[in-house]
Image (cartoon, coloured by chain):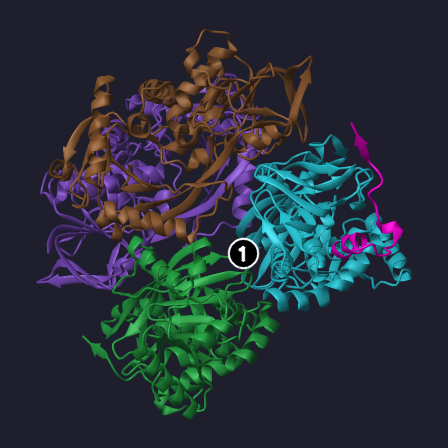
Chain colours: A green, B cyan, C brown, D purple
Amino acid sequence: MLYDAIVVGGGVIGSSVSYQLARRQKKVLVIDRGKTGQKASSAAAGMLGAQSELKGDDSLFQMARTSRAMFPSLAVELKELSGIDIGLQQKGLYKIASSKGEAESLQQLGRFQETAGEKAEWMDAGEMRQKEPALSDRFWGALYLPEDGQVDAPQLTKAYAASASALGADFLEHTDVTGFMEENGRVVGVRTGGGTYTGEAVIAAAGAWSASLLNHDRTIVETYPVKGECFSVQTERPLIAGTLFTKGCYIVPKAGNRLVIGATEQAGSFDESVTVEGLFQLMEKARDLLPSLQGAKIEHTWAGIRPQTKSGIPYVGPHPEKKGLWLATGHYRNGILLSAVTGTLVADQIEGKQVDPDWVTSGQSFITL
Amino acid sequence: MLYDAIVVGGGVIGSSVSYQLARRQKKVLVIDRGKTGQKASSAAAGMLGAQSELKGDDSLFQMARTSRAMFPSLAVELKELSGIDIGLQQKGLYKIASSKGEAESLQQLGRFQETAGEKAEWMDAGEMRQKEPALSDRFWGALYLPEDGQVDAPQLTKAYAASASALGADFLEHTDVTGFMEENGRVVGVRTGGGTYTGEAVIAAAGAWSASLLNHDRTIVETYPVKGECFSVQTERPLIAGTLFTKGCYIVPKAGNRLVIGATEQAGSFDESVTVEGLFQLMEKARDLLPSLQGAKIEHTWAGIRPQTKSGIPYVGPHPEKKGLWLATGHYRNGILLSAVTGTLVADQIEGKQVDPDWVTSGQSFITL
Amino acid sequence: MLYDAIVVGGGVIGSSVSYQLARRQKKVLVIDRGKTGQKASSAAAGMLGAQSELKGDDSLFQMARTSRAMFPSLAVELKELSGIDIGLQQKGLYKIASSKGEAESLQQLGRFQETAGEKAEWMDAGEMRQKEPALSDRFWGALYLPEDGQVDAPQLTKAYAASASALGADFLEHTDVTGFMEENGRVVGVRTGGGTYTGEAVIAAAGAWSASLLNHDRTIVETYPVKGECFSVQTERPLIAGTLFTKGCYIVPKAGNRLVIGATEQAGSFDESVTVEGLFQLMEKARDLLPSLQGAKIEHTWAGIRPQTKSGIPYVGPHPEKKGLWLATGHYRNGILLSAVTGTLVADQIEGKQVDPDWVTSGQSFITL
Amino acid sequence: MLYDAIVVGGGVIGSSVSYQLARRQKKVLVIDRGKTGQKASSAAAGMLGAQSELKGDDSLFQMARTSRAMFPSLAVELKELSGIDIGLQQKGLYKIASSKGEAESLQQLGRFQETAGEKAEWMDAGEMRQKEPALSDRFWGALYLPEDGQVDAPQLTKAYAASASALGADFLEHTDVTGFMEENGRVVGVRTGGGTYTGEAVIAAAGAWSASLLNHDRTIVETYPVKGECFSVQTERPLIAGTLFTKGCYIVPKAGNRLVIGATEQAGSFDESVTVEGLFQLMEKARDLLPSLQGAKIEHTWAGIRPQTKSGIPYVGPHPEKKGLWLATGHYRNGILLSAVTGTLVADQIEGKQVDPDWVTSGQSFITL
C-alpha cells in the first residue's frame, strides 16, 4: 500500500500531524516503536503557556499564540470524533516573582505582552493572595496571565490519535524504523524491523528519539534529550484555581483535587527514572510556593524526556537535504502547547500550501556525515 | 462537631447522597473504610440500562427511568463543580436475542415499554447488522433501546465526591465504623476505630459491606454480595457504537476505542479476584457476540462486589426500627443508574419532604437479633 | 467444621501463629478481611533489630533475642515447605550517633548489651567509614551490632502463610469478622459477613485493626495505629553492606542493589497514603546519612499502619476476660522480628504448655464497656 | 574509556555474557535501550527443558544438556554475589501425550534420551495421576523427565546483571545503539544517541531486536520475532509438583502456590499486548490439562517477544564478516536454559580459548546488502 504520509512517532506531535492529515483525506500511517502516547506526551503537565513560557517578540511566540487559540475548537472536534475530553481549562497562570528584581522584569514582560495584544496583569503580593489564598506569603507578586490555560496532556494525545484513527489513519505500534528508503535522492518510505512501508511523505516526529532515528542515515540532527521529573498529589480540597509558575517549578491544578508538579531539567538523559535528588528539589520548591501542600497525598512520580535543539527552536519543516522527508520535533517543553499549530503547519506544507516562512525552521543545525 | 448527616460509604451511592445533601447546604461527613470510589463503583461498566435491566411496570422501573433522565443535567453540574467529565454517551443499547423464543419475549417487552412511553425498536438480524456490522450473524435480532446510554463509572463516582467536597462535605477515609451511637432509641452518630462522630442523620451506604456494618449492632439486613468479573480491551478501530447486551454478557464501547465487557454473577463472594473460569466464560460469550474481538488487546481484568437483597429491590429509606438511621444500599447491578435518583430521594426524606411512597423500600427483610 | 484454631488476621503475626499451629497438627482457619500479607507486614523493611530497637533488660528484649535466634532455622524450614526464600541477611546494623551525647549513650548501651551476652562494638567515625565508605563524614561514630540482620518482609509473610497452607491450614480472605460467638462465657467461634465459623480457640491477630475487631463486642483493647511511610530506591552499585539506623531514619540494603528507607511515625492514622511532608523529611534524613543516595532511582513509596499499645508492649496471651480468645497484636514496629517467637508462644499456650510468664502480656490495658 | 567488551542488550543472554566476562576480570559495558531484563527475559516461564524442548542428537541438545548442568553451581555463585535467589527447582517435567500416536513417539524419544545418557521414564495414565493427581484423566500418559527443572526467570536475569555489576561491569540503560564504529574493517565500538563507546569486542545480544540493531548497518541477520503470551495464577493449595508440558501449553509450578502458564506462538509480532484470542486459547488448553485450574485466581497476563532464526539454531559466535563483532542471539524459547552455556561460550571465544566448533553457529543466514 502506498500511503500519502508516514508519520514516525505517535506522541503528541506525531498524533496531531496525523490527525490534521487525516482530516484532509490523506491516507496516513503512524509508526511508533512502543505504544503511542507513552513517552514525553503523557508525562507533560499540559500547560498552554504561550505567554508564560515564551518571552520575545519572535516567531516562536507567534506560533505559540496561534496554537493556544486553536484549543477551544480542537476540544470540541476531538470530543466529537473520539469521545475523549481533553480537559481544557482556561483559568489563567500566575508567573510568580521571588525577588524584587524578578518582580521588575515580570512587570516589564507584562507591559511588552500587553503591547503585543495579550492580556497580562501585575498583582502585588496582597492581590495575588486574595485570588489564591493558599500561596505562600513570601513572594513579591505575580504576573497574572488570564489566557494561559491547560489541558490533560495524556488525554490530548489519545484524543488526537483516536480521532485520526476514526478518520482512517493506520497505527503500527512496537515497530522500529531502522532507516529511510530512498529513490533518486528522494525519501519514499521507511525500513522497519518487520518490512518496508512506502509513502509520498515521511514525517520524523520521534521527539527526543529523533536524533537516533535520523542518525541511522548519518544525518545528524542536533537535538538532545532533557529529562523532566514530575509528581502529582491529591488534596482534600482544591488548593488553587490557576496554575503557579516559578523558576524550576510549576503547579498545575487538575480536575478532582489533583495537582501536577513539575519539572526538573536534566540535559542528556534518556532515563525515565525519578531520582531522589530530582524529587527532593521539586518538593522543596513546591512546598515553598504552597505550604499546605505538605499534607497532600502523593499519587505518582514520573519523568519524561523532552527533545531540545541547540537553537531552542523546534524543527517544523522540510528536511534541509532529503526531499520527501519532513521534520516535526525539538519542541522541548512546549510540545503540548505547540502540537495544534505544528499539526496544521506540517499538513499545510505537505499539501503545498503557503505558510508563514518564519515558522518553518528546519534549515539550521544539521550535519551530514 | 455536629454534622447534619454522616454517610457511611463513599461509593457511588454514598457519594451521590452526600452531593445532594451538600447542595442543600447540609454539613456532611462521608466515612469510608478504604478510599472512596474504589469498590463496586469503579468496577462497573457504567450502563444506564433503565429499559434493558428492568422489565416490569413496577416502582423500580419508575425509579430507573427517573434516574436515567437526570444524567444530562447532572453531567453539566458535576463538570462545572469538579472539572470531571462523566463520559455520558446516549447511543443506545441492543438487547440481543439468541433464540426465536428470546426474540419473541424481547418483542413483547418492547411493546410493553412503548406503552409505558419509552422508545424501543425491534430489529431483525439484517437491520441489526446494518447498524452494527461487527456483530455476529448468528443472532435473531435485537430490541434496540435508543435511550439507554452509559457513563464512565469511575469518573461518575469521583465527580459526585469531588463536587460534594467542593460544596463543603468532609471525607474521612481509611476509617472503620464499628457501630452506631444511640441516645433514647435514636441513632445519633457512629463509633469508629479512631473515635466517635455525631450527626443528625446517619446513612448506611456501604454497598455489599452494609450487612457487616449493620451486623455489628445485631440488626441483620438481608443483603448478600454478588461478585461480577469484567475485562476491558483496546481495539484498533471502533467495533461498535451502541452497547450490546445479552444473557450473561454485555459489551460497552468507551471513548478511545476501548470496550468494557462484563459480567459474571457469583453470589456469596467478597473476593475481588478474577478466576480462570470467570474470565474464560466471559470471553467465550463476548467472542460469540463480536467475532472480531479476537484480535483485541486485553487492558485490565477486575471484579466488583455488588450488594443484592433478597427481594431484589434496593433499600432506600429509613431503617425500620432505628430512628435517625437511613439506608441506601442493595442496588445490585444498577448502582450507577440508580445513583442519581437515590441521592435526591435520601436527601428529600432527610429534609422531611414528601416522596413517592412506592420508592421507599426499607421496610422489608430486616431481622433484629 | 470445627477448627482447632481460628486466626483472625493474615499478616505476619497471624501467619506465623497459623504456621506454628499447623506444624503441631492443628486444623487452622485464617480469616483476613482483605488479602493475607497486604498491610503492615508487607510494608516493613524487615530489620531483625533485637539490639537496635530494644534497649532495656526487660522481657521484650528477651523475646526479641529469642526470636532473632530462630530465623536461621526458620529460613530453611520455610524454604523447604513453600519454596520461598525469606532473604535472611546477617550483615549487621550500625546505630549511628549524630552528636557527642548520642555517641556516649550508644557506648553505654553497647556495654550493657555486652554484659547481657550480645555482641556490640563501638566504632568511631573513621572505623565506621572504613567499613561503610558511602556514609557521610558528619557523624560521630556508630554502635555496630553484628548480629542484627534482616529479612525480606513481604516474602517472610508469604512463606509463613504458604507453609501453613502446605501443612493444611485453610485461608479465608476478603471476609469481615463482625463479632465473636460465645457460649457459657467462652468464645467458641466468629461471626462474619458470610456466616459463622466455630473453633476451639480464636486468636485476634489483626494488627492495627485489632481495636476495631474487639470494639465490636465493646471490649476495648487500647491499641492505636502508627503510620509509617517508606520508600525504596535502586542504585547502580551497592552503596552499603550493613543496615544504617539513626533517629527517624533507617536504610536497609536489599538484594539486587535495592535500598529500603523508612520510616516516619504518625500516630492515629489508618491512611496508607504517602504525604509530601513524610517523604520529604525521610529523604532529607536519608541524604544526610548517605550523600550518594542523591542519584538513586526511586522505585516505590508506600506506608504501613503499625499497631501500638499504650504500654509499648505487645499483647501475646489470653484475653483477660473471655476464655477461648487469645491476643497476638500490638507489635508496633517489631512485628517482623517478633513474629517467630510470637508464633510459638501462642501455639504453646493454646496447647497448654508452660511458657515464660513474663512474656505473656495480655493482662493490661483492657476496658470492657 | 576503552572497554574490553561492550554488550548490546541487557536481557538474560547479554547479562550472562557480561557476568562471565566480568568474572574473568574484563571491563564490560552493557548497553540496553530500555531497562535491563525487561523484555523476553522476564516474560519467560523459566523452564530448564533440555530434554523436553530438544529432541535430536544434535549440537543444540548437547549445549542444552551442558547448560542445564551448570545451574546448581550458578545458583550458589549468583546468590553469593548478588543476594538474589534464582528459585532453582529440580522437580522434573511431564511431557504429556494426548493421543496414542503421541504416546508412542514420546516413548521413542524417551528411549533415545536414555541411550544418550539422560533419565526419562514413561508413565501410563495411572502412574502419572498417582504422582500428579490434579491432572486430567483424559491423557494417555507422559514421558517423565526428572532432571528438567526450572528457575525464576526474572530473578535469574537480575542475578546475572547484579553479579556482573558487583564484579565491576557498567550498565548504561535507556540508550539506543544506532550503529557500529569501524576501523580498518574491524568493529571497534558503538554509536549511540548519546555519544560513542569504544571496546575491543562488541557483542550483539539484543534478542528479537537484534535484526533491527544489525539492520542499521545493512547487515541483515535473518531473525524474526515470535510473540508468546502467558498468564499466571494463584491457587489455594499446590496443584502440581512437576512441570506439565504439552502441545501449545505448559504449566510451571512456582513458589507460593503460583502457576505460570504459557505460551502462544505468533511469528512476526513485536507487540507485547495479550490478545483475547491468545489468552482464550491458552486457558482452554490449560483447563484441559488441569481441570481444577478453573477456580484459580488470575494474577497477571503478559507477552514476551522471542528471537527466532530461520535455521532454528541460535547465533553464538563471531559475526561472519565483521571482525570484533560477536553474536549471541536467536535463542527462541530456550534463552533461559541456554543462557548459562552461552555466557561461557562467548567469553571463551573472546578470550581466544578453544571451544566446541559445533556450538559456534554464526556462519549461516547472513545477507549483507
**Residue at x 48%, y 79% (from the top left corner):** A21
Res C210 visible:
yes
Question: Could you tell me residue D70's position as x and y percent?
Answer: 24, 30
Query: Compared with residue A107, is residue A125 higher up or lower down, i.e. above or below?
Result: above
Magenta extent: B343-369
Quadrant where the C terminus of chain B sits is top right
Question: Is residue B356 one of those drawn in magenta?
Answer: yes
Is residue D39 visible in the rendered structure shown here? Answer: no
Direction from residue D248 to residue D356 in the image, left or right:
left
Secondary structure found at label 1: loop
Q: Residue at x 67, y 64 (%)?
A: B88
Question: Which quarter of the picture shows residue A327?
Answer: bottom left
In the rendered image, which residue does mark 1 sit on?
A236
For label 1, the crowd category at 10 Å Cα-Cα, with few meaning under 14, some 14 to 19 and many 20 or more, is some
**Above or below — where is C89 with respect to A338?**
above
Q: Quadrant of residue C218?
A: top right
Q: Nearer the viewer, residue B367 or C266?
A: C266
The residue under label 1 is which amino acid type? Glu
Q: Chain of mark 1?
A: A
Q: Is residue B91 magenta?
A: no
Question: In the picture shown, does residue A163 fall above or below C245?
Answer: below
Q: Quadrant of residue B320?
A: top right
- Residue A292 is situated, as x and y percent measured from the top left of the image, at 45, 59
